[in-house]
Amino acid sequence: MSRSAPATLGGRLGRGALGAWYGIVVAFLFAPIVTSVVFAFNAGTLGKQSARFTGWTLQWFGVAWANTSLRSAIATSLSASFWSALIAVVIGSALGYALVRHPSRRVRALLTGLTYVLLIVPETVTGVSLLLFYAVTNVPLSLMTLVFGITPLAISVTALIVRAGVLTLDRRLDEAAADLGANRWQALWFVVLPHLAPSVGAGALMSYVFSFDNLVVSSFLTTPQVNTLPVYLYGSLQYGPSPAIYAAAVAVFMFTMLILGLAALLYRLVQRRAARPHR
Amino acid sequence: MTPSTATPRTGRLRRAHRGHGIDHVFAAVPTAWLFVFFIAPLAFTVVYSFGHAEFGSVTLGFTLANYQTALSGFYLTTFLRTLQFAATACAFCLLAAYPAAYFIARHAGRWKTQALVLVLVPYFTSFLIRVMSWQILLARGGPIEFVLNLLHLTNGPLDVMDTQTAVFIGMVYAYLPIAVVPLYIVLERIPVSLIEASRDLGAPPWRSFLHVTLPLSRPGIATAVLLTGVPMLGELVIPGLLGGDRGVLMGQAISAQYLDSQNYALGSAMAVLVLLAVAIIVALLARLTRGFAEVSA
């Protein structure tokens, strides 16, 4: 199949140009990330971040760690994304399952629409609406109002991942379970859920990362007492870049990459499993 | 996917397929949750956009005054600037993403998945890390100035930070990976045989691209616009970090009404305008892909 394109000079040139463009795109995408990581180790000038690299140092990681409001922002972020991911994994998995398996086509269409709308409404609009919502209903901002505010996005992310998993599930599994006398709950719990476990796991990790990284909605729902890391870093960056901010962001970045690596491993497990019954 | 009535089943199975408490619970709980924490807040915004503004509060009622303000003078300029900005940045995203997606789908061979993941990884790293480093990259005396001077493309200091150009670069950069995915999915699905057929019938490569590949990739283009252009309409962080005070966009203008001016009614009207723009774009995209089985990838 792949050899079907005639290997003319023009074809090879075209392929070369496309490949070169792909390379440029990848370089463009990674350059800023590499820059951030490198400049977390930048000595800087007069305790400030400098545009020119002035020498390697590890001191900014220490400076960042000594900053108590930064540390409490990290703690808030960790617990807010934990609760958000927990809610998202329960509600998002149910939604992901219903997106594929709900008997009514109309309900499925409605749920699908809702899931996509969540992803495309600009976050600024969602954020101000939530702020207004809490103000009007007289609910004071707290950790939980923040968590609830960021759950819709996390739910839609989890739902889409679980939906992909449900699509690969063989319906005959449910039927076999029913034939063997299982009721729906038993079939779900003992047959479907174990098969979906990798997707649910990947969904949980992804929603954790999404919640942890959330900045726009959070920026409207945080208070001086409840401040998340991205909001804190964003606030500091508006007074100009500081190397300690870079150090903190990079440390967190490593943590995120670790979680994403786990999610990727789980996802590969799903795919390997999905490949089996079709053989 | 097939209707449950396709084959005769035993009573127990038919009952299982006709819908069960579980199905309703699984549909109702997420809907209820999203209704409270997503739909209801948006509805409040719509209601408040018609209210009478007072400092820090709104008297409910029905007036179009907020919309009049939002659609005149500074606010109208901001709105139009945002629309234009999102349109151009989105177009640049697509132009950059399409060839890359084409390469992955057609020429990456057995490295397809890895090639796609490589583009996606940056998207899933911290948003802040990706945007903030442009403050260094584009700064005077920074790396990009150095490279441009080295190549003799520019001479002397680079004056890009805190301008709309910087915001533009940041936007294209931030949303580029997510534009590649739907384009890749749709290009990957176009059967090679169709392109071969057009070649057999004598079409030069550019014609078979223009008349076969491009029209067939319309759903991917629509989804890419949905995932890049639409969120750009409300983008808050990129202009905040790279744009300075010049050329405020809608996201900042809305946020300022809520957090600084405390004019919730005007802020709501502006947010509703953004939502309307989103709705119109979605409707247009749906038209563009009419005749295709599904818009979404």
Image: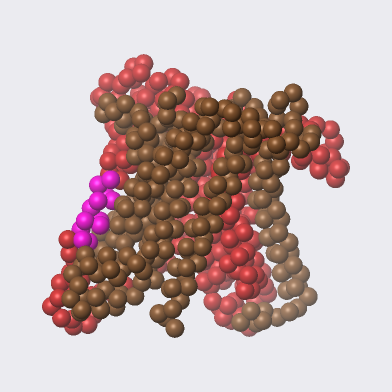
Chain colours: A brown, B red
Q: Kindly identify the residue that appears in the image at 51 percent across and 52 percent down.
A: A259
Residue in front for this viewpoint, B161 or B22: B22
The image shows a total of numbered marks equal to 0
| In the image, residue A5 above or below residue A40 | below
Q: Position of residue A131 (x, y in %)?
A: 36, 30
Residue B30: say if magenta.
Answer: yes
Residue at x 25% of width, y 79% of height: A176
Left or right placement of residue B95 versus residue A210 in this view? right
Work out whether residue A40 or residue B181 is closer to the camera in this orientation and state it.
A40
Up/down of B182 relative to A62, above or below: below
Looking at the rendered image, the quarter that the C terminus of chain A falls into is bottom left
Q: Is residue B46 left or right of residue B139?
A: left
Residue B1 position (above or below residue A65): below
Quadrant placement of the N terminus of chain A: bottom right
Place of residue A12 in the rendered image (x, y in percent of width and height, measured from the top left): 75, 73
- The image position of residue A43, as x and y in percent, is 75, 32
Residue B16 included in the magenta stretch of the image? no
Instruction: Give the extent of the magenta segment.
Output: B22-33
> Considering depth in this image, is A200 or A116 the residue closer to the camera?
A200
Is residue B221 visible from the viewing direction of this image?
no
What percent of the width, then of the height, locates residue A72? 48, 31
Task: Give the residue drawn at x 52%, y 65%.
Answer: B185
Assign the magenta stretch its main secondary structure.
helix
Tell me if residue B130 comes above or below residue B201 in the rendering: above
